[in-house]
Amino acid sequence: MGIIGRIANRKIDHMETNWTKEEFEIYVLLYAAHCNFIETEEEQDYIISKINTDEAIYNKMHTENVMDNEAVSLQKIQHYLKYNKYSMTDKENLLRHIKKVFFADGYVDILEKKVFAQLKKVFGL
C-alpha cells in the first residue's frame, strides 16, 4: 500500500462523527444527492424542506459532505450507526427520504440505484 492509501486509512481509522441525529440525516441525504456527482435544485429543495435546523448547520454538513470522498462518507455513516442509537424505524424512514431525494428530479440513474442498495446494506435492511 502506498503512502496515499496509508494516509486515507489513518483518516478513516481516527474519524469522529460528533453529529446530532439531524446532522447525520442531513449528511446522509446530501450523500445520496451527490452520489451521481450532480446535486439538482430539486434534490436540494427536498432536503431543505425536511430539516428543522438553521442554514448554518445545513451549510456545515454540505461542506463536509462535498469534501469527503465516497469511501470516507460511507465510513462516517457506518461509524455513526455503530456508536449511536438509531432504531430500525429511523433507518426505514431515512431510506424513504433517500428514495424521495433520488426521485426529486424525476429520474433515478444507475449510480443512485447502486448507492441505495449499498445504504440498505449499511443500514442492515
Image (spheres, rainbow, N blue to C red):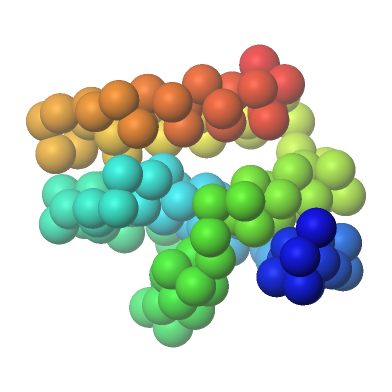
Residue 42 x %, y %: 15, 49
Q: Nearer the viewer, residue 13 or 54?
A: 13
Q: Quadrant of residue 76?
A: bottom right
Instruction: Please give left or right for residue 24 compared with residue 51 in the image.
Output: right
Say whether residue 63 is visible. Answer: yes
Q: Quadrant of residue 7?
A: bottom right
| In the rendered image, the vertical position of residue 67 relative to residue 95, given as above or below | below
For the point 71% across and 50% down, the residue is 75
| In the rendered image, the vertical position of residue 90 relative to residue 71, given as above or below | above
Instruction: Please give left or right for residue 103 compared with residue 81 in the image.
Output: left
Q: Nearer the viewer, residue 119 or 90?
A: 119
Quadrant for the C terminus, please. Answer: top right
Q: Residue furthest bottom?
A: 56
For the point 88% across and 49% down, the residue is 83
Residue 68 x %, y %: 54, 66
Quadrant for the N terminus, please. Answer: bottom right
Instruction: Please give left or right for residue 111 compared with residue 69 in the image.
Output: left
Q: Nearer the viewer, residue 3 or 91?
A: 3
Residue 89 x %, y %: 65, 24
| In the rendered image, the vertical position of residue 63 relative to residue 108, given as above or below | below
Instruction: Please give left or right for residue 30 compared with residue 36 in the image.
Output: right
Say whether residue 18 is visible. Answer: no
For the point 70% across and 70% down, the residue is 4
Q: Nearer the viewer, residue 23 or 2?
A: 2
For the point 46% across and 32% down, the residue is 115
